[in-house]
Amino acid sequence: MDVNRRAPLIALLAAAMFGLSTPLAKLLIGSIDPLLLAGLLYLGSGTGLSLLHLVRRGTTKLSGEAQLTRADLPWLAGTVFFGGMLGPVLLLYGLALTDAASASLLLNLEAVFTLVIAWIVFHEHVDRRLFAGAVAIIAGAVLLSWQGGLGAAGWGVALVGLACLSWAIDNNLTRKIAAADPVVLAAIKGLAAGTVNTALAFRMGAELPPLPQLASALALGFVSYGLGLVLFIIALRHLGAARTGAYYGTAPFIGALAAAVLLAAPLSYIHLAAGILMAIGAWLHLSENHEHAHDHDAMDHDHRHVHDEHHRHGHAEGDPPGEPHAHPHHHARLTHAHRHWPDLHHQHRHG
């Protein structure tokens, strides 16, 4: 099975890693300041991925990825701010004001915001099925938000919603640089965002937590925010932002179920009704089958690839041997029909 066909499974695995992080982070909030926890989660991600990068550096098959360029840096800076600094802080302060099950389900808004930004700002193709799924997810999120009223829980819902918007911006910015090495992207994001948020937390009076909680936060960050982000970036390059965000919408269901098990958090009828609406929306996204005749314009770029029907180029002296590999290459103009998503090679307009 090629990577394109595995991309939905990769996105779902990334969603599972992140979905489990919400109730587990809730367990740590009582003993760690929310801003400090946001910093530690990303420090765990950045440090762990940096070590992973050093270990795999000499392995051609694992390190055959395109490198970052100067043109990528503005997009990378945006992902660090919105995804690594702002989003986690909003989420963790929101978690402190609402229950973990509601917060986990509300994270479905990230998929909707991601889709809307990808559609309106970056012109990714969104058909009726994807739009209907987004409407179902929004309906479920609105139903959930009414539980909070106008008190503290209501503010918690608002903060979680803003975190989703921040991550949706991050997803679309990351989509612009998804051809680069995902381990390097996620490591830079983790180290930069983690360092800034941790320093801010200490400046505002936060204290270093006991060693067990500190180790738990760093480990959780490495798995959920580190490895999960690497898988998410790989899915982005093959599915596009709107569809990857849709698959990622399954994360809140995993988080809500984990909250019920780990925190003994009750799942009310409102939770169940909202979950059904969101499940319908996720199913509409997952069952999409997009196929039509389309044109590929001539282009030059660099990314990890194999010699499939989209890569029929020759190699110059010094290009890496074996597959998959990464090197600058040229795409000739091509017209054909097959099932596809808005990946690196399918950014065409639709009638």
Image (tube, rainbow, N blue to C red):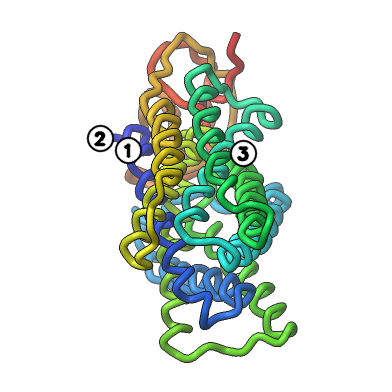
Residue 310 is at least partly visible in this image:
yes
Q: Secondary structure at mark 3?
A: helix
Along the polypeptide, which appears first: circle 3 or circle 1?
A: 1
Q: At which x and y percent is residue 187? A: 53, 64
Q: At which x and y percent is residue 256? A: 40, 54
Q: Which mark is residue 113?
A: 3
Q: Is residue 110 left or right of residue 225?
A: right
Q: Amino acid at mark 3?
A: Phe
In this view, 3 is above or below 54: above
Q: Secondary structure at mark 1?
A: helix
Foreground tag (2 vs 3): 3
Image-quadrant location for residue 207: bottom right
Tell me if mark 2 has few (under 14), some (14-19) or many (20+) residues whose alpha carbon lies within 10 angstroms of its own: few
Q: Which mark is residue 1?
A: 2
Q: Is residue 98 left or right of residue 244?
A: right
Q: Amino acid at mark 1?
A: Arg
Of all residues, the one furthest to the left in this rendering is 1
Q: At which x and y percent is residue 61? A: 34, 53
Image-quadrant location for residue 112: top right
Quarter of the picture containing the C terminus is: top right
Foreground tag (2 vs 1): 1
Foreground tag (3 vs 1): 3
Q: Is residue 70 left or right of residue 348?
A: right
Residue at position x 43%, y 70% from top? 220
Q: Amino acid at mark 2?
A: Met
- The residue that label 1 is drawn on is 6
Residue at position x 62%, y 41% from top? 172
